[in-house]
Image: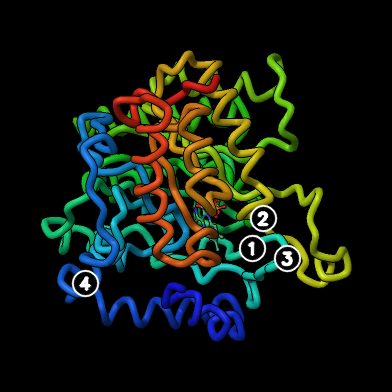
Amino acid sequence: MSLYRWMRPFLFLMDAERAHQATFKFSRWLQPVAPVFVRPWFAYTDKRLQQELWGLPFANPVGLAAGMDKNAELVRFWEALGMGFVEVGSVTAHSSGGNAKPRAFRLPLDRALINRMGLNNQGAEAVAARISEHRESYHVPLGINIAKTHSPDILGDAGIDDFVRSFELLAPHADYVALNVSCPNTTEGKTFEDPEALDALLRAIFEVRQSMALDVPVLVKLSPPPTENLRAGDALDEILDVAQQHAIAGWIATNTASNRAGLQTSSQALTQIGHGGLSGQPVCARSTALIRYLYQYTKGALPIIGVGGIHSPQSAYEKILAGASLLQVYTGLIFEGPGLVKRINKSLSWFLERDGFANVQDAVGANT
Ligand SMILES: Cc1cc2nc3c(=O)[nH]c(=O)nc-3n(C[C@H](O)[C@H](O)[C@H](O)COP(=O)(O)O)c2cc1C
């Protein structure tokens, strides 16, 4: 039994956000010595897991999903846990305290979380300063996820300017920039997951990227579809076409879900929790379905980062077979512990061997 299995019942006695803060405090303390005292337990190396995407070297395909380390405080710690890349954020142009607490809830029966954090973060300037101070010490690719500041007053063109401001401050420090247009926890944050609004946003982002003479890859993070049955001709196609016309570099699929169908947790408990985005096992199949759809729709032209309900090596491998080149974990780390990353990577080596793939890239999209 892993150490985390012993610790989990104590952590789960605390409110979800408090437990997050406590483990963060401990990890911050551990970070300076993590390469010596953490990495040897969690690192796993296999050449077959290595890939080069967007000109960046990924030692393995498992990375950290946005939202866990919004302010880029623990990048070296995540590296020591054996992650192949780290995505920090979402960061917004203005700092924000987020929504009122409590705003994160565990659903143990479903191995899921519901959160309405509301994009709490220290703001683009502070996060850029922190990253630029420590950038030299990072050894894995760093994605920076940006979103529109959580404020109902920042809408339309002001929302685009707000996104652009974050891009200007953060893109120079990023190996890739992820545009979070799919946060379900702000009343106004989802407006860019609409063809016209996305078109305007991407035009502005690519203009500023050009004016800065940067060629940083820009990825778009999507919401999970309402069901696993995705059909050609749905509204989603328009969004995909718009994004591809702007030469985005890849997709991240998916964010948390608004739809809560099929949960074991009682409807009374869900009513008590209130609104928020669902993550974890219940979104796994829907996220994988979108990955498969994206891969088929774009004929594998753009790398996909698969995220949503990865709690086991099998669910990770399914996303690769469906078309994901890279993977991210969040809720799985909370329920299964940090050993999940190594477990996935070790098992991926085994799955590749079993199924006769020479490397991860060979397996990407093999089941589409
Ligand atoms: C508490 C919490 C906060 C999150 N915050 C963000 C965020 O700021 N930006 C973002 O793009 N995604 C955010 N996410 C979504 C995750 O990055 C991920 O897409 C989603 O949780 C599905 O993956 P999972 O099932 O492995 O958790 C958050 C998720 C959780 C649970």
Determine the residue positioned at 34% across, 26% down: 361
Label 4, ligand 1: CB separation under 8 Å: no
Q: Amino acid at mark 1?
A: Leu
Contact flag, marks 1 and 3 (Cβ < 8 Å): no
Report how far apart the C-alphas of labels 1 and 3 lie in the structure. Answer: 10 Å
Query: Which badge, 2 or 1, comes first in the chain's sequence?
Result: 1
Report how far apart the C-alphas of labels 2 and 1 lie in the structure. Answer: 6 Å
Examine the rendered structure and indicate whether residue 136 appears above or below residue 98: above
For the view shown, which residue lies furthest in the right direction? 268
Looking at the rendering, which quadrant does residue 284 occupy? top right
Label 1, ligand 1: CB separation under 8 Å: yes
Disc 4 marks which residue?
34
Q: Amino acid at mark 4?
A: Ala
Disc 1 marks which residue?
113
Q: Which of label 4 and label 1 is nearer to you?
A: 4
Indicate left or right for 208 with 181 as reference. left
Determine the residue positioned at 26% across, 34% down: 48
**Coordinates of residue 205 in the picture (x, y in percent):** 38, 33
Query: Which badge, 4 or 2, comes first in the chain's sequence?
Result: 4
